[in-house]
Amino acid sequence: MKRAVLVAVAVVALGTVAAGESALPPVRTLGFGVVWVVAWSPKGRYLAVGGGASVVHLVDTATWKVVRTFEGHMLYVWSVSFSPDGTLLASGSADETIKLWDVVRGTEVRTLVGHRWLVTSVAFSPDGKLLASGSGDGTIKLWDVGTGQEVRTLVGHTGWVTSVAFSPDGKLLASGSWDGTIKLWDVATGKELRTLAGHTEAVFFVAFSPDGKTLASGSRDTTIKLWDVATGKELRTLAGHTDSVSSVAFSPDGKLLASGSWDRTIKLWDVATGREPRALAGHVGPVYSVAFSPDGKTLVSGSWDKTIKLWDVAARRELRTLTGHTDVVLCVAFSPDGRTLASGSGDKTIKLWDVATGRELQTLVGHADGVFFVAFSPDGKLLASGSGDRTIRLWDVAAGRELRVLARHMGPVYSVAFSPDGKLLASGSGDKTIKLWDMATGGELRTLTGHMGSIISVAFSPDGKTFASGSWDKTIKLWDVATGRELHTLAGHTDGVFFVAFSPDGKTLASGSADGTVLLWDVAALLRGR
């Protein structure tokens, strides 16, 4: 039986990722949500995790703690890949963009925009100079990593391009597609060299053997095929899974092939004989991604069941499961002193964590639906949470106690923000309104109307005189806090605005949208005329 893929999309708001040294002092973010993809860094020090949230987590494999959370994508992350030297990480997202991240500093290097649909796969060339990306728009793009410029677009598939991989010598590129074929391309010229046909359904993953002589492909037809790269002939079909094969990976020595499947298992195959020594069972949801550690001793798998599992390859046993909330984590926020982490989840709870130890301090229960946003007050004593149950709740952080429920919105509350002095709270809702609340009394001060769609994000300027709202109606509005008067409407995005944020000096406003772009606005110039 074939299952349709159910995609979970979460809009995630995260605190700022601090820069660090190469040792990457650990903080811990608990709860990965749906895991679509995992990738090892070249030396095995780190594991990158992407999935149903719009972030990429970087896990230190020495401690198995999350040491970086890369935020910036507007929709879920479909693919991740490290550069050969391990200094860069590329991520492809359903927001149609690719982002390049500095692994050491934890900062975004650049955003590559050009695809017209979700980016399903990214891969660096062996010399690290090129990046290949495959997309739901049916194309493959080659990018110059140094400049971020698009080098060329490869066209030929008649369906989604689901996977791309460079040969070890960097001369060939393989692509797998929803059209059921694999194509081999000449990297230097962009010319299509060969089409490999044999699968009866979509090809989900392709991978070269370490010597570059063999290509493996995993398909929705439940099989893995091995191909002779030089001739294009099919060498062997590995059959044994009972549902779609979503991911395949060769061990570093090329002797083993791991496959992950919607049948919830991972299989390890002997490449020379095609024999399956043993299946690894433990996930309770489809397995979407598998990857070997650089030394080949450990295999990692990511699953729809919201867990990541680590496996001892030699012993064929599970080593560890990384878990957190019982549903997708929709938002996280650090306290002002950085000692506490708050996380909101589709499981309707907020959890408070000790950042230094990763220990859960409190579970805040009260919401009747998923928690979309959490924000600490400037002094760190209060936490505000917005939920699909249409309420905002205020919590005493030290006591873990609910102080007040603000219930005047008629739709889900997608965003909350404290004013810099902590006296006001702004909330944005699916009812197309923004509300300002008095924190001393809990009373509603005013309701601001003007947007034609849900309010997804609100943010105060650093001086507290202005606040911005981003909406599904594709616009950003600037408001005067004292009077509630609309000052400006900023139009430029071609899809919903998911996030707005002021620069620390208040002169620039950044907005992120479902159109795959981030726009920077000169609000200082706008506000001078008010």
Image (tube, helix red, strand yellow):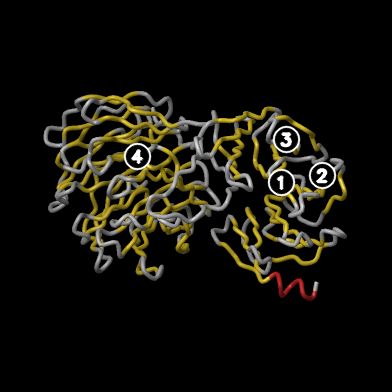
Q: Position of residue 406 (x, y in %)?
A: 80, 38
Q: Which mark is residue 377?
A: 1
Separation of disc 4 and disc 2 at Cα? 44 Å
Question: Residue at label 4?
Answer: 62
Circle 3 Cα neighbour tier, 10 Å, few/some/many (<14 / 14–19 / ≥20): many
Q: Is residue 1 left or right of residue 419?
A: left
Separation of disc 1 and disc 4 at Cα? 34 Å
Question: Residue at label 2?
Answer: 439
Say what secondary structure mark 2 lies in: loop
Circle 1 Cα neighbour tier, 10 Å, few/some/many (<14 / 14–19 / ≥20): many
Going by the numbered disc 4, the residue's amino acid type is Ala
Q: Quadrant of the N terminus?
A: top left
Going by the numbered disc 3, the residue's amino acid type is Trp
Please say if the residues under marks 1 and 2 sit with CB atoms less than 8 Å apart: yes
Specify which label sits upstream in the sequence, 1 or 2: 1
Separation of disc 2 and disc 3 at Cα? 12 Å
Which residue is rendered at x = 77% and y = 53% of the image?
421
Specify which label sits upstream in the sequence, 2 or 3: 3
Q: Position of residue 126 (x, y in %)?
A: 25, 58
Q: Position of residue 168 (x, y in %)?
A: 20, 55
Say what secondary structure mark 4 lies in: loop
Say what secondary structure mark 3 lies in: strand
Q: Which mark is residue 519?
A: none
Q: Is residue 33 visible?
A: no
Question: Residue at label 3?
Answer: 395
Q: Name the one closer to the observer, 92 or 436.
A: 436
Going by the numbered disc 1, the residue's amino acid type is Ser
Specify which label sits upstream in the sequence, 1 or 4: 4
Which residue is rendered at x = 16% and y = 36% of the image?
271
Circle 2 Cα neighbour tier, 10 Å, few/some/many (<14 / 14–19 / ≥20): some
Q: Position of residue 443 (x, y in %)?
A: 87, 42
